[in-house]
Amino acid sequence: MNKDEFKILIVDDEEGMREGLEKALLLEGFSVQTAANATEALQKLRKGGFNLAFIDYKLPDLDGIEIIKRCETELLNIIIITAFASIENAIAAMKLGASDYLIKPFSNKEIIEIACKYYKQKSMIGEENHGHSTDNFIYTSESMKSVVENAKLIAGSPIPVLIEGESGTGKEMIARLIYKEGGFDGKPFIGINCAAIPSELLESELFGYEKGAFSGAHQTKIGKFESAGAGMVFLDEIGDMSIDLQAKLLRVLEEKSFERIGGLKTIPFHARVISSTNVDLRDYIQKGIFRSDLYFRLKGVQIHIPALRERDKDIEVLAHHFLDHYRIKYQKGVLELSAEALRKLKRHSWPGNVRELKHVIESAVLLAGSKKKILSEDLPIESGIDSIRINVHELERASIMNALVENHFNRSLAAKSLQISRKTLYSKMKRYSIEF
């Protein structure tokens, strides 16, 4: 990856601060965009493509924590800019997905050093010698190669797509691949998890509402469908949508328009719809909990993502990918998987799929201590058992390691984030042979 491909977002309500940081990073060769408030920042972040974001904790509309809660952070490094008095809030933000925090005042040199650090990490992680890499989709199996190729083939057409696969297989990543390959640059990608939003609230999230439409509707709200414009709407876990709301969604897809709740104005709907499910919708149709007409409307093209156990060739390349990521994140230096550890990974059935593998490797990296090699016993799994088992002592040691890393090995801050005294922290570090 070249520096001009590494995209950085600066979010700060002070114009001088934004412009100064933007100029410094542009001169260093990075691709930079800015936002003056949280609303503008979220609009840009939801379009995707950013690798790093510097976000001021205190903004006029929402704070930095709210931005993290409302955007996808898995593929994005977020640096919270904070005053000394709000370090606790910055640490809370890191627990929600932020990568680091920067205390005011700071120099442009510090900003450049941080940007170069994460650029280097991204470049190292992207250098995959064991398999194919497509927008963080790491694979070597023919089945995943076929999934990626099919996604690219249909990306430029307006046809609806239904992505099927177990939880943790990467359905949203395929949706984002279709978005990127489909020529949606500059247009929104709006993801909605139908399973995470209560059914009584999902309708207003999708369609919005007019002021006074119901008790508590003190102002007009723009829904996700309206915000999508001519971009893409991703309906994740569509099988969890209520039967009543399914009927309304079907009408929107057929008529290409909708009204806000309590409104009379017809709003055109131009976005492309991609949906996903981790259940067999045909079985739901038989049970009467999913509409067959909506099913056929959504499944213009079906893409099935195989479970990790069905593509065991990908386990090793993914394990190495996550190992590289977390050894850099936790500053572990040289660290590799032993042959026995790899065999154990390949024997596991992975009921949680790629997401489970990612968490297993992260735990193993944290639990490795000063060792240079991850052994079979360091992996918090038991072959043949569909659950991850970590004993209490391992969990406590990993928690302490994580707190120390997040707080740059400052023992006082680490103890505070763990809500224990410094004396207790020192005692536990001695018990678990944690030394720095």
Image (cartoon, rainbow, N blue to C red):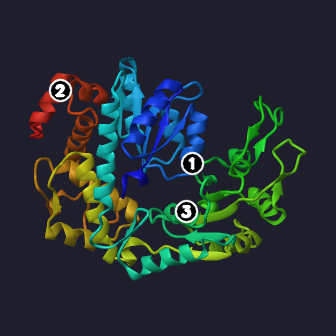
Residue at image mark 2: 424
Give the quadrant of residue 361: bottom left
Left or right of 179 in this view: 102 = left
Q: Position of residue 72 (x, y in %)?
A: 49, 48
Which mark lies nearer to you, 1 or 2?
A: 1
The amino acid type of the residue labelled 3 equals: Lys
Left or right of 168 in this view: 180 = right
The amino acid type of the residue labelled 1 equals: Arg
Q: Position of residue 376 (x, y in %)?
A: 16, 63
Please give the name of the residue rendered at 29% of the width and 64% of the height, measured from the top-left corner: 127
Q: Position of residue 219 (x, y in %)?
A: 77, 31
The dot on residue 46 is 1
Give the quadrant of residue 389: bottom left
**Disc 2 secondary structure class:** helix
Residue at image mark 3: 180
N-terminal of the pair, mark 1 or mark 2, is 1
Which mark lies nearer to you, 2 or 3?
A: 3
Camera-nearest residue between 98 and 399: 98
Left or right of 322 in this view: 176 = right
- On the question of residue 348 being in view, the answer is no
Mark 1 to mark 2 CA distance (whole Å)? 42 Å
In this picture, is 332 found above or below 184? above
Quadrant containing the N terminus in the rendered view: bottom left
Camera-nearest residue between 357 and 20: 20
Does the CB distance between marks 1 and 3 fall below 8 Å?
Answer: no
Q: Position of residue 332 (x, y in %)?
A: 18, 48
In this picture, is 175 found above or below 18? below
The amino acid type of the residue labelled 2 equals: Thr
